[in-house]
Amino acid sequence: LGTICQVTGRCRKNRATAKRLIERYFRQLTEGCGNSNCTNEFCASHSAFQPLDNNSAAAKSLELFKVNAKLCDYYPSVRSSTDASSQMGSKMSVDEFSDVHYLTEHTVCRILGFCEEEGDYAPLIRVIGRIFSNADALMKSFRKDELSVTNNLESLTSNDEKQRETSKKEDASTRAALPDETPNGLPDACELTVDIDAVRRVYDRLLSIDQVEAALVNALIYLTPNVELDLEYLDVYETSPDYLNIFIIVMENSNLHSPEYLEVALPQFCKAMSKLPLTALARLSKLWSTYDLPHIRRMMETFQQLITFTVVSNEYDTENLVNDNETVVAATQCLKIIFYASILGGEVDVEHNEEDEEDSESNELTLHELLGEERLYKKGPRVDPLEKELGVRPIDSIRPLIPFEDFVNDSLNDVIEMDKDFTFFKVNAETKFSFQSCPFILNMITKSQGLYYDNRIRMYSERRLTALYSMVQGQQPSPYLKLKVRRDHIIDDALVRLEMISMENPSDLKKQLFVEFEGEQGVDEGGVSKEFFQLVLEEIFNPDIGMFTYADDAHLFWFNSSSLENEAQYTLIGIVLGLAIYNNCILDVHFPMVVYRKLMGKRGTFLDLSDSHPVLHQSLKGLIDYTGSLEHDMVLTFQISHTDLFGNPILYNLKEQGDQIPVTKENRQEFVDLYVEYILNKSVERQFKAFKKGFLMVTNESPLKYLFRPEEVELLICGSRKLDFEALEKTTEYDGGYSKDSQIIKDFWEIIHSFGEKQKRQFLQFTTGTDRAPVGGLAKLKMIIAKNGSDTDRLPTSHTCFNALLLPEYSSKEKLRERLLKAITYAKGFGML
């Protein structure tokens, strides 16, 4: 049924497109293209064309469509707002500029000068309407090799001269970077032929004239449907790469975000741009990456404004999806070009990549393939086609031109139906657009919902496969990942069980986690798992074990390069991190950002050192900036020293015979690079490789790497340390007879707000199982406070699985405070209530 629907959808789309093409042929045969010098024998504007009646023209249109005959560009007559007398008076001027078939800065200034002398802009409006509505004419306009307007300086004011000089200085880098290569060393596909400086100067002059603005809007409306068809069905870019000039010229219009364009012109233009082939999109991205920040930001804001305007102007629900809105989809795809341009134009590091271990491919059919579900559970991270074409990834960005956060559209995120979008992303990617294919526009909450659906479907799949295997093999394997551990031997028990699973059947790690503490009666609905993670982390990060070192200056943990523990211990902590993401649990982990960058495929660099080893970073930065004599003042060599687990010094040569190579001004950068490479990568390679292996055992088939940046992965694992209890109070629900107006509830919140930071975190730990806020803040926690009897000496209790606090109705505020403090301070373990 799904396949039939997809084919039907494509047929409808093809029929609609065919209808539009036939209509264009019909108009060409009956009305002509408006070009008095037309050379197309199948156009009414051709001098030798024999007029046809409507029926004959309709039949001829079908014939031309079948043979894919030549289509003329349409030259509309753009009427000005002048009255009839001024139109009659401008007859001579129309004839005078009828030979203008493309624009140069000189031509525009000449026509402007004429119009200003006559006091009538009608000739200019006609020329602008004719050229900007014709793809071929616009493509040939503003060429670099044409006569510059500098030969006609007399027609320009001194103020215009100053503006031109300023523009030249601002965009010198644009012309210098093309066509050879961009500042990041990415070669351009072919030479840029449009003079961007001239285009900007022309727009500065034209947009100050109100009548011309209307002509530009109308011309764009005429232009874009034809451009869209040319790109989609005539492959015009392949035969003429200069076709890209149309989009370059139109995007220089600084008024595209204004209301006049948002209704029709800009949506149509975005649809046409989205039809450009991949090589053209990459070329646009490379070009725009060379622009200065104000220009690239203006383009980003133009597409964002169109998305927001369209979203707020319509209503969306589960039946009417925003994914089906062509304008929003096309504008999002256009925004992707700017997103990668922002990365290319900023600071990037396309090197320093970790080598990913390739999974051995099996020729055997999996059960998912036998069931026809391979699309839903396909392995390997996605790679965006534009990203691959450009050879740069978001994780390669050190500092983009525009902050990543500015590409997020909150209005759009509010109306996305994530369950439907996830289905499009995983199953119907070829026929349905998913916003997860453009993750830069999604906020953390929306992306985490997508990840949640992916995880849950995998858990459901594993349960389903377990049921199938049990029927075939006659066994009863568990549909869950069950861990039974002793509280005082938690690491040993967890390590043995998880190591056994990872060796015998790693797919079991994809099952839903179910933890049982030996001798305790708690049933794991999520809360027991939370405490399991907390206790494992407390044990693993205990300095006495020596797996990690703690930096007092950074308040962060780092891998102990001289640890005596075997690799299985590090694999365990990697599995724990993966399981936390997979089971939607927040962990109290204190890693530097470089750990998450390395997990996502990057090696540690000097910039990462400021976070993980701030003192060393300052020392090496001082070395780089030192102006004195390094040989005499510092007496450093390419041999470094650090201490092992027991405080004994360890010497290491960064280069062969490093102890005999002095550090000088000439080689100090090499020394710093090798030092950083050793500290962040080589010295902990064994430990980190095992750690990453455990992490990927759980997340290797997840869209985690595709959807999230390293800082977002940290937020996903660790939650937010920013606690807004005002927001928590507003979203808390009440049960069992309590309401927000109950006196004890008012007293409760007054007590909570009076707590210090430590006590607030203890309360969160007691109620939810973690002292961190989830993605989206405490407002997303959905805590419940339920009445648990009348006044009593019993302490408050909680169901951490459901973020529920069971609160007796104490007789006084003082008693409530005393009981609550005792409960959150000494609570530990699970028992039957």
Image (tube, rainbow, N blue to C red):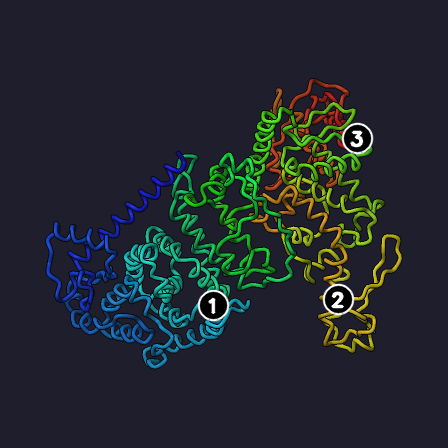
Residue pushed farthest top?
790
Q: Is 418 left, or right, of 695 in this rendering?
A: left
Q: Residue at x 81, y 77 (%)?
A: 631
Label 2, label 1: how far apart the Cα atoms are? 37 Å
In the rendered view, tell whether residue 159 sits above or below residue 32. Answer: below
In this orientation, which residue lies closer to the viewer: 80 or 756?
80
At label 2, counting other C-alpha atoms closer than 10 Å, the crowd grade (few under 14, some 14-19, many 20 or more) is many
**Contact check, label 3 and label 2, Cβ < 8 Å:** no
Q: SS class of the residue under badge 3?
A: loop
Q: Which labelled disc corresponds to residue 620?
A: 2
Circle 2: element type: helix
**Mark sitting on residue 188:** 1
Would you say the residues marked 2 and 1 are in contact, meaning their CB atoms lie under 8 Å apart? no
Query: Mark 2 belongs to which amino acid?
Result: Leu
147 and 45: which is toward the camera: 45
Q: Identify residue for label 3.
A: 486
Q: Badge 1: few (under 14), some or many (20 or more) residues near its Cα, within 10 Å?
A: some
Give the foreground label among 3 and 2.
3
Question: Could you say where residue 796 lies in the image, as x and y percent from the top left?
Answer: 73, 25
As drawn, is 813 to the left or to the right of 542?
left
Q: Earlier in the sequence, mark 1 or mark 3?
A: 1
Badge count? 3
Q: Is residue 741 visible?
A: no
Q: Which quarter of the image is occupied by the C terminus?
A: top right
Up/down of 289 relative to 595, above or below: below
Name the amino acid type tagged 1: Asp
Direction front: furthest residue? 363
